[in-house]
Image: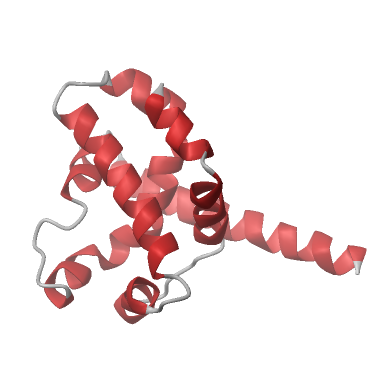
Amino acid sequence: MKLYDLRREATMREARNWFIGFFPENVDDVMRAMLDPKTSAFYRMVVSYWDMAAGFVNHGAINEEMFLETNGEAVLVFAKIQPYLEDIRVTAANPKYLINLATLIMKQPDAEALLASRREMLKNMMAARLELANAAA
């Protein structure tokens, strides 16, 4: 229950709202988000939260099936980072960066297809959001 409460905290909500609109196209975009004082805290807050939550699952503190049934956001977050993960690990000299989240998501059946579909869904969702905003203006 505390994990859910942490997601509702005001700064975390702001960080999650920022992250939903973050669409990195290469490792440099991710590294810039990690290092830019305007985005660094938001980026780190979101990815470290989901990596920590996945760690609880991977180590048996939370039931995996239940977690995945109720936390689709973890997949969405990983879908944005996964194409660049190996390069991030090399660039950041951190071979275990997001190891818990990667382990949890990549062991799911058809993980690559799931992640690709989530990336496409997010792009379509953001395009629709932009279209609504433009129509309202």
Residue lying farthest to the front in this orientation:
10
Above or below residue 62? Residue 108 is below
Quarter location, residue 17: bottom right
Look at 39% across and 73% down and name the residue there.
Answer: 33
Image quadrant occupied by the N terminus: top left
Q: Front-most of 108 and 80?
A: 80
Q: Is residue 109 above or below residue 94?
A: above
Task: Name the residue nearer the viewer: 78 or 43.
Answer: 43
Colour scheme used in the picture? secondary structure
Question: What number of labels is visible?
Answer: 0
Question: Image point 50% across, 56% down: which residue?
Answer: 15
**Residue at image x 15%, y 67%?**
89
**Quadrant in which residue 130 is drawn:** bottom right
Place of residue 26 in the rendered image (x, y in percent of width and height, measured from the top left): 35, 77
Compared with 20, 105 (above or below) is above
Instruction: Please state, as top left, top right, bottom left or bottom right, where the C terminus lies in the image.
Output: bottom right
* Place of residue 9 in the rendered image (x, y in percent of width and height, measured from the top left): 51, 41
Q: Is residue 113 above or below residue 133?
A: above
Q: Quadrant of residue 54?
A: top left
Residue at 28% x, 68% y is 84
Left of 62 or right of it: where is 79?
A: right
Residue 20 as seen in the image, left or right of residue 78: right
Residue 105 % position (x, y): 27, 40
Q: Position of residue 69 (x, y in %)?
A: 42, 24
